[in-house]
Amino acid sequence: MKRSTRNRDCDVRNLAEGQAPDEAAERKPRRPEATPAQRALGLLVRREHSRKELARKLLARGVAEEDAAAAVNRMSEAGWQDDGRFACSLARTRAAAGYGPLWIRAELASHGIASAEIDGAFVALAESGDDDWTAQARDLLQRRYGRTGQRDLVQQRKAADFLARRGFDGDCIRSATRDAPDA
């Protein structure tokens, strides 16, 4: 955006008088810097975060380690941050995206989620009916490779490797690749 000639003339006059252009301009009152708790809340409003992830993001934004830990504790006590809720949300999202239970467990563990809360997330998946991993693997293969009916050995191997990379266990992979319903 171009500045008007009037503003440029004022800047030239101010520089000639020894003032910086910003000093002469009308100053807007600056907003006070956000507290660590306000920054944490700003992050949590956008999406769920684990305790570990929230603390890491606060540290990256220049918050001191003690202040970050206090802010995370405060958010947790107030109910804004909950690792169990985060685990359920992430597990549901990843399962819907076609990832298997091994992948989901590993990702939750990388976020610093306790095993009891990971188990709770899988119980929530089971209660919602989203834990039929063999059906999900079959659906994923159908979307990826189409309805091919009987697959040859090379296609089965490719499909099995794909499912293994997605975090499905051996029994699920065997069921999805060998016992695939004929189209």
Image: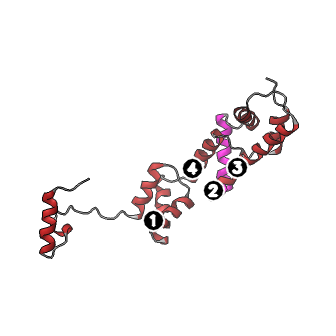
**Disc 1 + disc 2, Cβ < 8 Å:** no
Quadrant in the rendering for residue 32: bottom left
Between label 1 and label 4, give the one nearer the viewer. 1
Farthest residue toward the right? 153
Contact flag, marks 2 and 4 (Cβ < 8 Å): yes
Query: Which mark's residue is nearer the viewer, 3 or 2?
Result: 3
Q: Amino acid at mark 4?
A: Phe
Mark 1 or mark 2: whose residue is earlier in sequence: 1
Q: Earlier in the sequence, mark 3 or mark 2?
A: 3
Q: Position of residue 15 (x, y in %)?
A: 16, 72
Which structural element holds mark 2? loop
Residue holding disc 4: 86
The residue beneath circle 1 is 61
Instruction: Name the residue beneath numbered marker 3.
Output: 103
Give the label on residue 113, or none.
Answer: 2
Q: Is residue 144 left or right of residue 26?
A: right
Residue in view at x 61 percent, y 49 percent? 87
